[in-house]
Image (spheres, rainbow, N blue to C red):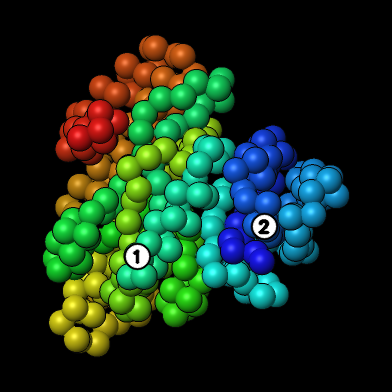
Amino acid sequence: MTAVRVVMPVHNAAGYVVAALESVLRDLPESGEVVVVDDGSSDGSGGLVDTLAARDDRVVVLRNDAPTGVSRALNRGVTFGHCPEFVAVAEHDDLVLPGRFAAQLAALRADAALGAVSGEGRYLGPTGRVAGRVSVGPRTDAEFHRMREAGREILIPHPAIMYRRDAIVAAGLYDADFDAAQDLEIVNRLVYAAGWQVRTLAEPHVLYRIHDTSMSFSHISAQRMMTRYIVYRNRAQLDGEAFDSFAEWQQSNQPDRRTRWRWYRKDTGALRYRQAGLAWLNRRPIPFIGNIVAASVLHPRWVLMKLRVARGR
């Protein structure tokens, strides 16, 4: 009997999708299944996935004629046919590390209060260099409750997340209005609206691939507004108060010029830190130094926080 389904949305990832899917299949139990949603790819990704599916009957391929966005693609994968008790997400360019699925299944089965778990990760550069550390979210029951009682935004690493099917269905699946931060939005809805707990397991489960297409400034800016809205919504839900929709909230919470400048400086600093990381992974010392200095000037608190995470603190 199938216990776990892995959903992998794919859009124009021909350079990465074969390695990504093969890493999933190596770690997936023989009774597991992978639902690949080819979301309107035009670069041959679909044919590559079809070839792998022909060799491994654990793989099912769904195809969208035109791109629908990551949230709708994920929802299609979750709701296809009869979804098993647990459903995980895998990115079309990341690599699953050995032991991920076994550890996550064990954690969910051991604690009925958990609606989702994830694991830590490391960054993978275009040259194959691995560095840094991806670790966010609560690791313990006490840490989770401190964050929730404060109404804080809660995020566990989405590239390595596994849900209890009943939890993600109770939360209402992904919301396409939040495609720039669909992971943050659904995890917080899972916690604050549906009443589930989440955890990040203190072990590496994914190599998170960094490349030029992940360096979007507009993505950072959109995430900032969505994060502020989610904190507002969290606190309203804790207080039992009604809350505006995201569109309504945006209209009444437009920042003034000074605030926009402050956000622009911080967002630019965060972007330069990402660019520094990419330069490090590509073994380019001069761009690394330039970007890390710029990031430290523009957003020093962000740089210090990221360095603490990288050191395991």
Name which residue type carries label 2: Ser
Crowd rating for badge 1 (residues with CA inside 10 Å; few <14, some 14–19, many 20+): few
- Quadrant of residue 64 in the image? bottom right
In the rendered image, residue 216, in percent from the top left (x then y), is placed at 46, 43
Left or right of 102? Residue 73 is right
Reading the chain from its start, which is encountered first: label 2 or label 1?
Answer: 2
Point out which mark residue 31 bears: 2
Q: Which residue is mark 1?
A: 111
In the rendered image, residue 257, in percent from the top left (x then y), is placed at 21, 55
> Is disc 1 placed on a helix, strand or loop?
loop
- Quadrant of residue 259 in the image? bottom left
In the rendered image, residue 75, in percent from the top left (x then y), is placed at 58, 69
In the rendered image, residue 87, in percent from the top left (x then y), is placed at 55, 63
Q: Which residue is more in the foreground, 10 or 226? A: 10
- Quadrant of residue 4 in the image? bottom right
Where, quadrant-wise, is the C terminus in this rendering? top left
Q: How many marks?
A: 2
Name which residue type carries label 1: Asp
